[in-house]
Amino acid sequence: MKVDQLFVNGDIHTFDPALPRASTVAVLGGRIIAVGDDDLADQFTADARIDLGRRSVVPGFNDAHNHMVFFGMSLADVDCSSPPMRSVEDICEAIRQRAAETPAGGWVTGAGYDQNKLAEGRHPHAKELDAAAPNHKVLLKHTSGHMCAVNTAVLDMIRDTPVPSGGELGRDADGALDGLVMEQAQSMVRDLVYPLTVDRIVDAIDQASRRYLAEGVTSATEAGVGAGLVSHSPIELMAWMEARKRGVLGVRANLLVAVEALHHISHAEGEDSVFALDGGIHSGLGDEWLRIGGTKIFSDGSLIGRTAAMFDPFEGGGAGECSCGFFQTEPEVLRRLIIDAHRSGWQVCTHAIGDRAVSTVLDAYEEAQKLYPRHDPRHRIEHCGVLQERLLDKVKALGVIPVPQGRFISEIGDGMKNALGVHRTPDAYRQRSFLDRGIPLPGSSDRPVVNGAPLLGIHDMVNQRTASGEPFVPHEAISPAEAIAAYTGGSAYAAFEEKVKGTISPGKLADFVVLGEDPLTIDKDGIGQISVDATIVGGNVAYDLLGIAN
């Protein structure tokens, strides 16, 4: 039999219990048609025969929660992450250098700063940014995406704009605006440059795709498009379609539509209410390359920004009247949105990080299912950052999928520990607790909040150490095999795609990654340093470090 591609001489971890190890994969029309040992290769001829050189192979990595467009655009911003930045002055110097290259009156944009990692332990102030770029508008995006710092030129442009519900502006000891813009208040800044052009969004998808393929990512869920703070244009879906048409969408994309883009639609008498995109479009429309997944709803903020909605105050103080953070969406409004979206067939994917927010979302999911029962809705809690142990059984009973981020443990784990304190850190970013109760565990990064390379995330899921070397929550550590399964099968399940993704098995999409070392046998401290030698999407070698396709 003739096939399109025949991959031979591999050390393949299929993650298929029916055949865990193999050496040969036959691909036809972008799908796997056979998996087996060396003898299998004799049964086929192929247009392309690719020798894997006994390298380790695993299913393609699937990032269940990321911001691909934001990441692609951030590649052009001033890098304000730490390292290289160690202080506010370091950031100001970088802004000063970029301003010298930017026409007067233009924007100077930086991304990735984290006040927890700066020597001063605080956000940059507007006056400091004024001094660095006196003739420009300055915008610094916090690594969490939940706040930003701006200079006086930008403050003057938004000063008379009412602060939206679910947002706050920072003030200094004298009550003057200090340049910090939190949560929904960021829309005031965003609206100064919104919307972006389709071409710019397509270019960002192109740039991000190249990086993702080099890191073994073959599928990704874009956590919010089309409206709200996560939006880049009201016609953002068009940009994704255009990226595919131009051939620059390198990874398979599952889009979560921002709930702000949905509306109640007229329908025939006697039919159920419809809360959806025009035409009644909801979860599931699309194909193996580009599809509409769930709807994204924000309930609260972030831990390191101390805006997540908590039952008790943050250690050392936080945002909100009682230092307990706050809701971006008022609980009653949040409840109504969840019920309406559930009733209209959406997979509901709600951002909830603080324990109070997580509990509130679970209550709304429970009520929605009682009012309008649906089979297997697979509603998700994006991040599910702080989950009290008493609620684990409720997550299981409701069939809710938590979507935590393993890489948070290293890059922002110290900041999270400082915000939560010793008594609450054990409730943060659970993994082992989910698997032990049979709760599905996807793998994700929330890129560009942290480095999105899956092997780095897998490393942290296994090792549970912060950037300072301190243990995070050691009892939540999982094995390398479990972490890879999360980044493959777990993420596929979270997107209703387990029938076509997640294992190297006949009938599934031919998406897999060739690695420089075996992640299941290497010392666990070395997982993050494993090289990605090749990435195969639909049987085609989309990234080739060593020239295996030649």
Image (tube, helix red, strand yellow):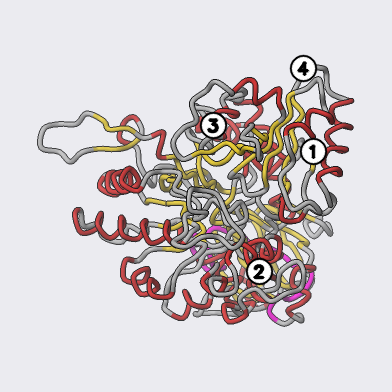
Is mark 2 in CB contact (under 8 Å) with mark 3?
no
Magenta stretch, residue numbers? 499-520
Q: Between marks 4 and 1, how big is the CA–CA gap?
A: 17 Å
Residue 444: where, in percent of width, then height? 58, 59
Residue 187 disc label: 3
User: 407 or 116, which is in the foreground?
Assistant: 116
Q: What amino acid does circle 2 point to? A: Ile
The residue wearing badge 1 is 78
Please name the predominant secondary structure of the magenta segment in the image.
loop
Precedes in sequence: disc 4 or disc 3: 4
The residue wearing badge 2 is 458
Precedes in sequence: disc 2 or disc 3: 3
Is mark 1 in CB contact (under 8 Å) with mark 2?
no
For discs 4 and 1, the disc positioned in front in the rendered view: 4
Given the current orientation, which residue lies at the most extreme front position?
Answer: 174
Precedes in sequence: disc 3 or disc 1: 1
